[in-house]
Image (spheres, rainbow, N blue to C red):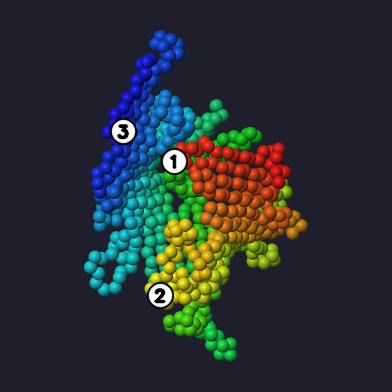
Amino acid sequence: LALTGEIYTKGSWGLQARSAYVKRYRYSGSFNLSYLKTITGDKGAPDYQAMTNFQVLWSHSQDPKANPALNFSASVNFTTSGYSRNNLNSYYSNSFTENTKSSTVNLTYRRPGSKWSLSTTANIAQRTQDSTLAVSFPNITVSLSQITPFKRKRAVGAEKWYEKIKLSYSGVFNNSLTAKQDEFFKKSLIKDWRNGMRHNIPISATFNVFNYINVTPSVNITDRMYTMKVNRQWDPNASVEVCDTSYSFYNVWDFLASVSLDTKVYGFFQPLPFLGDKVKMIRHVMTPTISFSGTPDFGSPFFGYYGTYQYPDAQGVMQTRQYSKYPNALFGVPGVGRSGTVSFSLANNLEMKVKDDNDSIGERKVSLIENFSVSQSYNFAADSLRWSNINTSLLVKLMKNFNLNLSATWDVYTYQLNQAGNPVRVNRTRLQAGKGLAKLSSTGTSFSYTLNNNTFKRKNDKDKKGSDKKGNSGDDTDSDDPMSNAPNADRDPRGNIDNDIDLSSDGYMKWDVPWNLSFNYSIGYAYGKFNKRKMDYDGKITQNLSFSGNIRPTANWNFSFSASYNFETHKIAYMNCNITRDLHCFSMRASFVPVGPYKSYNFHISVNSSLLQDVKYDKRSSIRNGVTWY
């Protein structure tokens, strides 16, 4: 423990306590407590001012093996708004310019052998610029891992249908307030603090029907608990909206029910004999899935989550406005409008089994199409545009380390011009208009590849290299190389041993130049301009190519670059080159941009030691000479 103090001639003084603590195999941490009493000006003068500030720094961590069920950690950095401006030590550190500070204290408990867990957190965020505090405490989270509540402990006979029901639980309580530092303790816990609870219970089960179809019904229940509700109405006398806030306990809940059906269909195809016996079998696996989901209209007066009132518009016509009774709620409110959706999806996998003499079983599997899926949905509750876009995805393994991943979206509706002349989607499918089933609206893919020293090395070369190492071991005394057993084989002409030099078989030092070259290419297709003659969007293709490289001709020299290519202008859009040289005690770096509108250069040489970091020389291009420097 270190206790220090400071005192000044005009009466300012301060105290500080610093300590670090460790309990072996249990926990460790440190704290720093500071208190400042700052006086400026002379007593009785108009500029006389006395201020009190303090700082609390605390860091605590627990050894994971100390208590696997309970974990406590803290990272506290709390200071009053005027501490950094009045503490002389802050003038020469980064804390003087910090605008935000944050503190977190966390406690997590999980009972051994239980699926329940409890976590509580306290967070404080400070904004020094305007002395604003954002406090969130306590934040409590309770969770229960998935369980089967109706499963028998001692099952006799076949499993009952209700034993397949699974559920889990998560509960969250939050309490937060954002206020000025001098007004924080004056705020009301009920009226000013934002608080609420949320409970989430997902329930599901999977049943097998007709031995081939899996049926999974599920329901997700969400319950929110708030302490504030707002009722609004229109005041015809003042022609304004008035609010009436009531504080009590209010429950806001909703649910989502769904059921899905899926199965797998296998198809096998054996090639004809005259095509050869290399391919033994081709297998096609289809996984169709149909799901239904729906929710009622939680904006109806039956639930009471939304209210309405009438007001006159600018022309004096009465209009109806709907509003939420729980504005700015921590966990939101259920949505307005009912929904009833049926979704379809079909996943495909295509594999081939071929003969392979190198394999232990004489055959191997080759993936032709790893995955090809198609999905679409239909909303029964919508009044128009019930069909969703068709989504497709394709995954093909072209090579060992290269996969083609392609996703696409297909538009099923047509377009018309509104009164303003802008294209809008209309409730008429492309199939009804005789334009086909759908039109490709967006797709794209990207891939990257890296070349380096080992890319073009053959397997035989690697095997030969390994055999050479084995044949040239120290136990081989019959080597034809007269220098192999010489006592000074690893010595330089001056007789100094240098084990870092790698010599080839002819006695010369190996010249190994590490290098790499990376490419990244992406291509995309999307809607471009609207064609009013065709009443449809024209497609637009976008491409991007970027590449970078690096080469080290010696241990101290390094050359690197990065560039991008513009396919519209057919030119290099940007290129940045860097050259570095390690000069032992010094470092030299030169970078330049040779093409594009940002042509420039920069040269830098400095001492490596941090104690002499100001010993350096910089030369940069300017607006005057940056373009024509070369």
Amino acid type of disc 2? Asp
Amino acid type of disc 1? Ala
Q: Which of marks 3 and 1 precedes in the sequence?
A: 3
Q: Position of residue 489 (x, y in %)?
A: 45, 65
Badge 3 element: strand
In the rendered image, which residue does mark 1 sit on? 329
Mark 2: few/some/many CA within 10 Å (<14, 14-19, 20+):
few
Q: Nearer the viewer, residue 212 or 567?
A: 567
Badge 2 element: loop
Amino acid type of disc 3? Arg
The alpha-carbon separation of the residues under discs 1 and 2 comes to 80 Å
Q: Position of residue 306 (x, y in %)?
A: 47, 43
The alpha-carbon separation of the residues under discs 3 and 2 comes to 64 Å
Q: Which of marks 2 and 1 precedes in the sequence?
A: 1
In the rendered image, which residue does mark 2 sit on? 476
Badge 1 element: loop
* Quadrant of the image occupied by residue 499: bottom left
Above or below 352: residue 430 = above
Which quarter shows the N terminus?
top left
Comparing marks 1 and 3, which lies closer to the viewer? 3
Above or below 405: residue 618 = above
Mark 1: few/some/many CA within 10 Å (<14, 14-19, 20+):
some
Q: Which of marks 2 and 3 precedes in the sequence?
A: 3
In the rendered image, which residue does mark 3 sit on? 18
Left or right of 357? Residue 251 is: left
